[in-house]
Image (cartoon, rainbow, N blue to C red):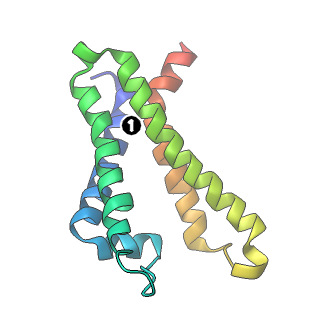
Amino acid sequence: MEMILIPTVIAATIGCFMGGASLAVPRWGASVVRLQADPRWKGGWSEFRASYGGAFLLGHAAILLTFFMRSQAGSAALMGTGFAMGAFWIGMALGRVVSMVADNQQHETRTGYNLAAVGFETIMGLALWSPFLGHIAS
């Protein structure tokens, strides 16, 4: 395996684990993102299985599938799936940073948890971008 692909495979595996865990045990996913279903609206609990479970699991599984099929799919497929999910993670980090700046006074968003999450999300995004970053660097 090319060294540049190792971070992508590790990050995609972590994302699959997080998605699978949230799909199987939505209370775990809810606790990670520190949210809960609104009791005023029926069916809200399924959002944890859908968004933090199924979407995370299959989005990251697509990266692993293109990795294992890269001889047939080509490196562009791996770059594309990795870039899309990497943008997803970087977008979460960006949104969290904006919240830490814009919302802190009213909602106390500048926390150690959010700072650590920005770091984790950025690392996951960059790891998933590694095939693309390696391609443009060469």
- Asked if residue 79 can be seen in this view, the reply is yes
Q: Residue at x 40, y 31 (%)?
A: 81
SS class of the residue under badge 1? helix
Q: Give coordinates of residue 35: x percent, y percent.
A: 46, 76
Relative to 80, say whether 104 is above or below.
Answer: below
Q: Residue farthest to the bottom?
A: 39
- Residue nearest the viewer, comparing 98 with 9: 98
Q: Give coordinates of residue 32: x percent, y percent.
A: 41, 71
Q: Which residue is mark 1?
A: 7
- Residue nearest the viewer, comparing 127 with 15: 15
- Quarter of the picture holding the N terminus: top left
Relative to 32, say whether 95 is above or below.
Answer: above
Amino acid at pointer 1 = Pro
Relative to 30, say whether 52 is above or below.
Answer: above
Q: Residue at x 73, y 72 (%)?
A: 103
Q: Residue at x 31, y 59 (%)?
A: 53
Q: Residue at x 53, y 40 (%)?
A: 87
Q: Residues within 10 Å of mark 1 (few under 14, many from 20)?
A: some
